[in-house]
Every structure is written in structure tokens, then in C-alpha cells.
Amino acid sequence: MLDYGYDREAAAAYGVVCGTDEAGRGPLAGSVVAAAVVLPPELIIPGLDDSKKLTEKKREALYDVILREALAYGVAESTAEQIDRTNILATSLDAMRRAVEQVKSVVIPGLVLVDGNRETEFGVPCRTVVKGDGISQSIAAASVLAKVTRDRQMEELDRLYPVYGFAGHKGYPTKAHKLAVYEYGPCPLHRRSFLSFLERDRDALEKALAEKRGTNPPEETE
């Protein structure tokens, strides 16, 4: 449950408070998306919480409320290609920085609240908050913007690449998703650095594919 006094206390000490969070660090495909949000200090958004605890319908409704009520917000992403070129942590933090830069074009925060335990350089003071999307209202708002934005992207990818089922699992490594990647190969939006399971789990995937097709897996030969 959010602590609605958390951001107010931070604002009393630092002035403008900006919360930032990301969505999509774990999936096998698609971008990682970060958002940054500045809310009025006295505002309370009923029903807002960590986006992972909310239904899709609730997140969509809150998305509109956040955009309407926010004093400033930013949304940025790092692509699958960028993730493969560096790593998921670096690209997530970079997306957060760019989301905060969008906020700074409207208002300069006195403090950036970052979900998690990884500090980064925003050009203004920052504070990490472990499980902050369940504590800070501005971080929770950022988590909703990031999650809804990314989910919409995955639904669009589902229309482009329907064999993978992106609309259902949103790119996360479900059994069905892994099997689809094994069966059809990765699409251009898959993160190649996340696909080591294709070799590591080859026997299990071959067995699952044979069961799906109603055939027997090939016998091993000398």
C-alpha cells in the first residue's frame, strides 16, 4: 500500500520530487521502457499502486488520470538492439535518465526517486527506494506509465508477429514463448543476448515441440 506521506515529506525537504521506474527488464523481446513523473505534492490518486499489482483495465484507467494530473512526465525506451549491445541494467538506467531529461524540460526536480537500489546520475540529487513502486506515489505513477506504454508496444508486435503470442505474455519467458522462439526462430525484436535457453534447453524444447506436433522427437545418433 502506498505511503502518501512519503512524497510530501520529500517535497518539503527538496522541493519538486520526480519518481522514475521502468518496465520490461525480464522479457525476451521488445524494448525496456522507463517513465518519470512529477505529481502535485498534495495530490492523492485513488487506487494507484505498483503497476504489477493492478489489472490491465485499472492500469489503463490510471494511465489517463496520471497524464491529466501530472505536472510533468517523460517516457523513454531502450531497444532490443541497444540491450544486446550493452546490457539490460545499463540500458534501463539510460532510459530512466532520458525520461527524467524530458521532465527537466518542463520543471527541474529537487530530488529524483528511483525504484530499486541502483543509483544513477540525473544531474540532480537522487534517492533509491527498494520496492518504491509500492511506497512512493510518483514512482507508482511512473511504473504505470512505463507498463502501459510497453504493453501497448507488445500488442502492436503481436499484430506484426502473431506466432509468438506477444499480446498474452508481453514478451516474458513463458514456456509457450520459449517454444515459439525455438519453433520459428527469433524475430527482429527479440533480445539475442536473452536466448541462451535455445541451446541450454534444446532437448526439453525438442520434446515439447514434438508433443505439440503430435510426433516423436528424433532419436540421438552416434
Image: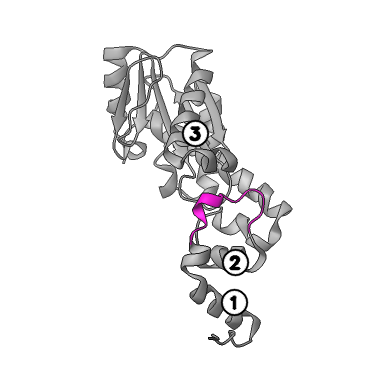
Q: What sort of colour scheme is used for the picture?
A: one colour
Q: Is residue 159 visible?
A: yes
**Alpha carbon of mark 2 to alpha carbon of mark 1: how far?**
8 Å
The one of 157 and 193 positioned closer to us in this rendering: 193
Whether tag 2 and tag 3 are in contact, CB under 8 A, the answer is no
**Alpha carbon of mark 2 to alpha carbon of mark 3: how far?**
29 Å
* Residue position marked by numbered label 3 in the rendering: 34
Q: Amino acid at mark 3?
A: Ala
Name which residue lies at 60% across and 51% down.
190
* Residue position marked by numbered label 1 in the rendering: 209
Label 1 residue SS: helix
Q: Residues within 10 Å of mark 1 (few under 14, many from 20)?
A: some
Percent across and percent down for residue 4 are: 31, 30
Whether tag 2 and tag 1 are in contact, CB under 8 A, the answer is yes
Give the label, 1 or 3, closer to the camera. Answer: 1
Percent across and percent down for residue 207 are: 54, 80
Q: Amino acid at mark 2?
A: Tyr
Name which residue lies at 30% across and 30% down.
128
Name which residue lies at 28% across and 14% down.
12
* Residue position marked by numbered label 2 in the rendering: 182
Mark with earlier residue (1, 3): 3
**Magenta stretch in the rendered image:** 186-196
Q: Residues within 10 Å of mark 2 (few under 14, many from 20)?
A: some
Percent across and percent down for residue 133 are: 37, 38
Label 3 residue SS: strand
Answer whether residue 41 is magenta in the image.
Answer: no
Left or right: where does residue 135 sit relative to residue 143? left
Mark with earlier residue (2, 1): 2
Look at the magenta stretch and give its main secondary structure: loop
Name which residue lies at 55% across and 25% down.
68
